C-alpha cells in the first residue's frame, strides 16, 4: 500500500475519533466524505455507504452507521 493512501486512512480514522469523542482542534482536519461515498448516499444506498466508510476508516459497524446517518439527516 502506498504511503499517501495509508496516511489518508490514518487521518480519516483520527478525524472520526476526534469527532466521536467531541474533541475539536484546529490541527486535526475533519474527515471528509469521499466522492464515492457521497455518490452512494445520493443514490440512497446507505448500506453500501456504511460498508465504504468502514473500509476507508476502519470504524466499527455502530460508528459507521451513526456517521452515515448523520450525513443523511
Image (tube, grey):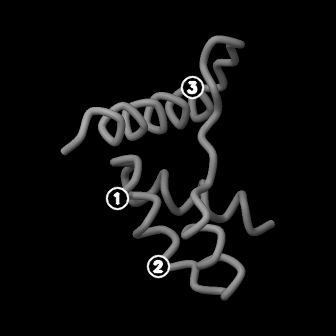
- Which numbered circle lies on residue 18? 3
Q: Give the CA separation, mark 2 to mark 3.
A: 24 Å
Seen from the viewer's position, the closer of residues 56 and 73 is 56
Disc 3 on helix, strand or loop? helix
Residue 12 image point, x, y percent: 48, 38
Q: Residue furthest right?
A: 73
Residue 54 image point, x, y percent: 39, 58
- Which numbered circle lies on residue 55? 1
Residue 10 image point, x, y percent: 37, 32
Seen from the viewer's position, the closer of residues 2 and 44 is 2
Label 1 Cα neighbours within 10 Å, binned few <14 / some 14-19 / many ≥20: few
How many numbered discs?
3
**Above-or-below relation of 47 to 66:** below
Q: Are marks 2 and 3 in contact (CB under 8 Å)?
A: no
Seen from the viewer's position, the closer of residues 29 and 2 is 2
Please give the residue where the numbered disc 2 appears in the rendered image. Answer: 48
x 62%, y 32%: residue: 19
x 69%, y 18%: residue: 24
Label 3 Cα neighbours within 10 Å, binned few <14 / some 14-19 / many ≥20: some
Q: Are marks 1 and 2 in contact (CB under 8 Å)?
A: no
User: Which of the marked residues, 3 or 1, is nearer the chain's N terminus?
Assistant: 3
x 59%, y 40%: residue: 31
Which quarter of the figure is the N terminus placed in? top left
Between disc 3 and disc 1, the foreground one is: 1
**Above-or-below relation of 48 to 18:** below
Q: Give the CA separation, mark 3 to mark 1.
A: 18 Å
- Which numbered circle lies on residue 72? none
Q: Give the CA separation, mark 1 to mark 2.
A: 11 Å
Q: Residue furthest left?
A: 1
Q: Is residue 47 left or right of residue 32?
A: left
Label 2 Cα neighbours within 10 Å, binned few <14 / some 14-19 / many ≥20: few
Disc 2 on helix, strand or loop? helix
Amino acid at each position: 500500500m502506498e504511503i499517501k493512501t495509508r496516511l489518508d486512512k490514518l487521518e480519516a480514522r483520527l478525524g472520526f475519533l476526534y469527532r466521536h469523542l467531541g474533541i475539536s482542534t484546529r490541527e486535526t482536519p475533519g474527515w471528509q466524505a469521499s466522492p464515492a461515498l457521497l455518490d452512494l448516499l445520493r443514490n440512497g444506498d446507505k448500506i453500501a455507504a456504511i460498508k465504504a466508510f468502514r473500509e476507508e476508516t476502519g470504524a466499527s459497524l455502530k460508528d459507521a452507521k451513526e456517521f452515515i446517518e448523520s450525513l443523511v439527516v
